[in-house]
Amino acid sequence: MIDGKKVLFSGMQSTGSLTLGNYLGALKNWVTLSDDYECFYSVVDMHSITVRQDPAELRKKARNLLTLYIAAGLDPKKNCIYYQSHVSGHAELAWILNCFTYMGELNRMTQFKDKSAKHADNINAGLFTYPVLMAADILLYQADVVPVGKDQLQHLELTRDLAQRFNSIYGDVFVVPEPYLGKSGAKIMSLQDPTKKMSKSDENPNASIYLTDDTDTIIRKFKRAVTDSEARIKYCPEQPGISNLIEIYSACSGKSFAEVEAEFEGKGYGDFKLAVGETVADTLKPVQTRFDELCKDKAYIDGIIKENAEKANYYATKTLRKVQKKVGFPERIR
Ligand code: TRP
């Protein structure tokens, strides 16, 4: 608890460009959570180097992501928006937690298995212990809730196990976090293969709408979106492509699936795709405009970065000192 509010932690990696899926599935909902929770939203740049990165690119992407958090509507005075690498406590707690994590537990992580298959030439120890760093992120701020996608639930489960394991040895040190299961965000699928999640690491640029795509690009990508030959606009498992477009249209317009179906009853896929493209472009426009403005205001963003790193450090250090004492590290002499 901070000032009587429950604590919420989440983070995104600064690799790739954010997609409509990240926006509608996560970012947009984060904004509505900041009234009810004390929120920490991190740009988890330390996680990114488990895969080889170009340094200049990584720095630029991290800054863009932090700026996008604000452009999407997160008030940086209310939400702690910061770079993970600016708070050394993440690495320090991760080390301690590593010593409480079993190899067997990490061997079971499906994301590790997937990523090591994808990067067979660089299966490094960081990739293996990635979930422990993620646990440290969350436990460092004594987070009560963590909004995450399904693909991260296994990591959150490990975080809970580690917190409970530590607490059972040393007493109540960590809050045991829960996945955030409130009104969850929309699940947006690839435009080229609607059985796969829309992903920022997809090699086919037509599969994803990037938050920085202009109106023409957005409309073109929707025009090419893979659908079916049923020729009816209905949300159902047999029509994953059309269902995905309905989900997107609904998330952008606030209309229910039934309302969308009624609106396009008897209309062709061409009309519907165009309407989805236009609605998405309208939804992203204000975020893009704000992003461009913010990018020009270097001093403002720098100020946010500094202030929020200090705030994050304050809370992180509080937890870290407690943990260090519990495991038996010598007291600091002041
Ligand atoms: N592993 C998460 C992902 O790839 C990102 C992440 C890192 C995260 N630390 C976190 C998410 C802590 C929630 C809480 O999506």
Image (spheres, grey):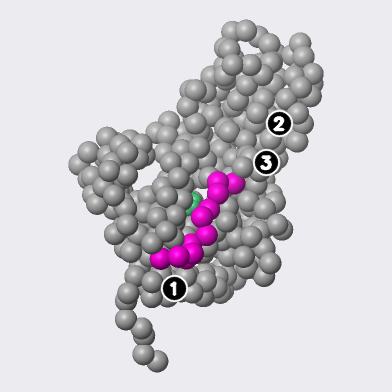
Q: Residue furthest bottom?
A: 334
Q: Amino acid at mark 1?
A: Lys
Q: Position of 46 compared to 121: left or right? A: right
Q: Which comes sooner in the sequence, label 2 or label 3?
A: 3
Amino acid marked by disc 2: Ser
Which label was assigned to residue 183?
Answer: 3
Q: CA distance from mark 1 to mark 3?
A: 34 Å
Q: Nearer the viewer, residue 106 or 81?
A: 106
**Front-lying residue, 129 or 28:** 129
Q: Residue 8: x, y in percent?
A: 59, 57
Question: Would you identify the image quadrant in which residue 155 lies?
Answer: top left
The type of residue carrying mark 3 is Lys
Say what secondary structure mark 1 lies in.
Answer: helix
Q: Is residue 99 left or right of residue 169?
A: left
Q: How crowded is the residue under tag 1: few (<14 C-alpha within 10 Å), some, or many (20+)?
A: few
Task: Inspect this view and state whether residue 237 appears.
Answer: yes
Q: Residue at x 38, y 71 (%)?
A: 326
Magenta run includes residue 171: yes
User: Eyeballing the image, is 109 above or below 319?
Assistant: above
Front one among 29 and 66: 29
Crowding at label 3, few (<14), some or many (≥20) Cα neighbours within 10 Å?
Answer: few
Q: Establish whether ligand 1 lies closer than 8 Å to the Cβ of label 3.
A: no
Residue 78 drawn at (x, y percent): 66, 65
Depicted 4 relative to depicted 123: above or below: below
- Marks 2 and 1, the one that precedes in the sequence: 2
> Does the segment drawn in magenta span residue 113?
no
Between label 2 and label 1, give the one nearer the viewer: 1
Q: Which residues are magenta?
A: 170-180
Depth check, front residue: 140 or 268: 140
Q: Which mark is residue 250?
A: 2
